[in-house]
Every structure is written in C-alpha cells, then in structure tokens.
Amino acid sequence: MTLKEIKKLKIDKYSKETLIKFRKSELDRLKKRRKEGLCCAVLNHGPGHQSKTFCELKGKHKIHECKYGSYEQCMRWKGKEACTSFFDYPVKLKA
C-alpha cells in the first residue's frame, strides 16, 4: 500500500498517522538494504505467514535464497516475494 492510498483511507486520523509512520520506516529499511548491496526480496513464513525473512544473497541474481524458521529450512524462489506452504515447508522452485 502506497502512502497516497493510506491518505485516502476513510479511517481516523490517529490510525492514518500510524500507518504512514510504519510505511515510511519500512521504506527506509528497504533503502538501507539497497544501499548496502543487499537484496530486498522477502519470504513470508510462519503461522499465517506473519514472519518475514529477506533474501540472503548479494549482488544481482534471479533466484533468491534464505534460511528461515527455527529449523533453518532453506528456500529458493523467483520474484520479489514468496510464501512457504501451509505447514511452513519450503515450496519447490518451478523451472
């Protein structure tokens, strides 16, 4: 959700300000990662996919990779964002 979309929402002022601050901090974190040469692709995992883990690779690449969870499962994926399966197992990369 962009900052413009947040401003157009029909919610109270306090909620808008909170969402805007959260979104700005998220954008700042991504800018910092890019500046350090880190990848911004993210894996959503955990119950309900509420946890996020960034790709651990540096430089240009098409296949992203990270270790996630308490058992350090490894997952590879294409695209800016991916999700684990229902039981938090890695999903096989489609060719």
Image (cartoon, grey):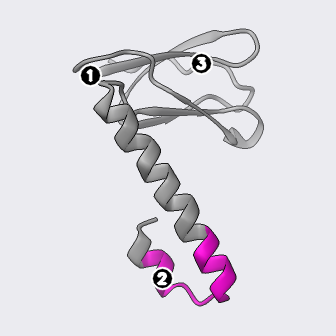
Vertical order, 34 against 24 (above or below): above
Identify the residue at image location x=29%, y=33%: 35
Mark 3 vs mark 2: give the one in front.
Answer: 2
- Mark 3: few, some, or many residues within 10 Å (few <14, many ≥20)? some
Mark 1 vs 3, N-terminal side: 1
Q: Which image quadrant for residue 74?
A: top right
Q: Element at badge 1?
A: loop
Name the residue carrying label 3.
90
Identify the residue at image location x=77%, y=36%: 47
Mark 3 vs 2, N-terminal side: 2
User: What residue type is disc 2 on?
Assistant: Lys
Magenta stretch encompasses residue 7: yes
Magenta stretch encompasses residue 49: no
* Residues at discs 3 and 2 in contact (Cβ within 8 Å): no
Identify the residue at image location x=39%, y=33%: 33
User: What residue type is disc 3 on?
Assistant: Pro
Mark 1 vs mark 3: give the one in front.
Answer: 1
Mark pair 1, 2: CA separation: 34 Å
Name the residue carrying label 1.
62
Relative placement, left or right, of 80 versus 88 is left
Q: What's the magenta region?
A: 5-18
Q: Nearer the viewer, residue 54 or 93?
A: 54
Mark pair 1, 3: CA separation: 18 Å
Identify the residue at image location x=76%, y=15%: 70
* Residue 15 spot, x, y in % from top left: 67, 78
User: What residue type is disc 1 on?
Assistant: Lys
Mark pair 3, 2: CA separation: 37 Å
Name the residue carrying label 2.
7
* Residue 72 spot, x, y in % from top left: 67, 9
Q: Residue furthest left?
A: 60
Q: Which image quadrant for residue 17?
A: bottom right
